[in-house]
Image (tube, helix red, strand yellow):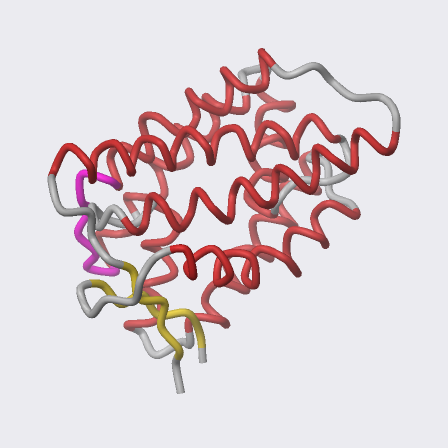
Amino acid sequence: MSESITLPLPRSLPARLAQLHGGLALYGVGIALQVESGLGNSPWDVFHQGVAMRTGVSIGAVIIAVGALVMLLWIPLRQRPGFGTIANVVFLGLFADAAIALLPTPHALPLQALYLAAGVCAVALATVLYIGAGMGPGPRDGIMTGLTRLGLSVRLGRFLIEITALGAGWLLGGTAGLGTLVFALAIGPLTQLFTRWFPLSPTRDHPRGE
């Protein structure tokens, strides 16, 4: 049986917009911290970094381009984007590039590990914030949701998507390593933990897995 994460919606539209964009900004910082740690990126960011290395453009530009292309896959899956989906495509890459430009690159292992831990925590909290705004899933999340409509479990759908992104990114030269494993193991429990900061409400249910 599937579990669900239940999040309340902020009461006003300005609050929802602030939560959405705050979540996306924090997500960009989380991406930057993990990239700058040099210890291994999340599966999707292994792919983004690999494409960036091959094309000579920034990781943020790749995040934007891939997000837009992924949305094309929503058409056969009969997914409908929300305002938050479009905002994710437009702003996430910009926030990631800005954070990468501002953050110093650590060279000592303890500081690299700190960057990694902070990055994974930031992404988990950011996920709760932008999904909790209730304005639509990110483009990559929508693919997972669409696959569940075809009969796959959330867990299997997410695994297939992320293992494909990871494999392609590694072949392109993206950084996969200990950080990638830490992200894979920690992101689910941390996201669930951060939902405890929100009171339970029947307004929004998000499937978590089977």
Q: Residue at x 42, y 20 (%)?
A: 94
Pick the front one: 118 or 75: 118
Q: Residue at position x 47%, y 55% from top?
A: 194
Q: Quadrant of residue 107?
A: top right
Q: Quadrant of the C terminus?
A: bottom left
**Residue sitting nearer the eye, 13 or 68:** 13
Does residue 40 appear to the left or right of 20 in the view shown?
A: right
Q: Residue furthest right?
A: 108
Residue that lies at the very extreme toward the left in this rendered image: 12
| Quarter residue 108 falls in | top right
Q: Which residues are magenta?
A: 77-84
- Of residue 132 and residue 199, the one placed in the foreground of this image is 199
Identified at 52% across, 43% down, the residue is 123
On the image, the x and y values in percent for residue 2 come to 39, 81
Most common secondary structure along the magenta stretch:
loop
Q: Is residue 137 above or below residue 111?
A: below
Q: Residue 120: x, y in percent?
A: 61, 44
Verify whether residue 79 appears in magenta.
Answer: yes
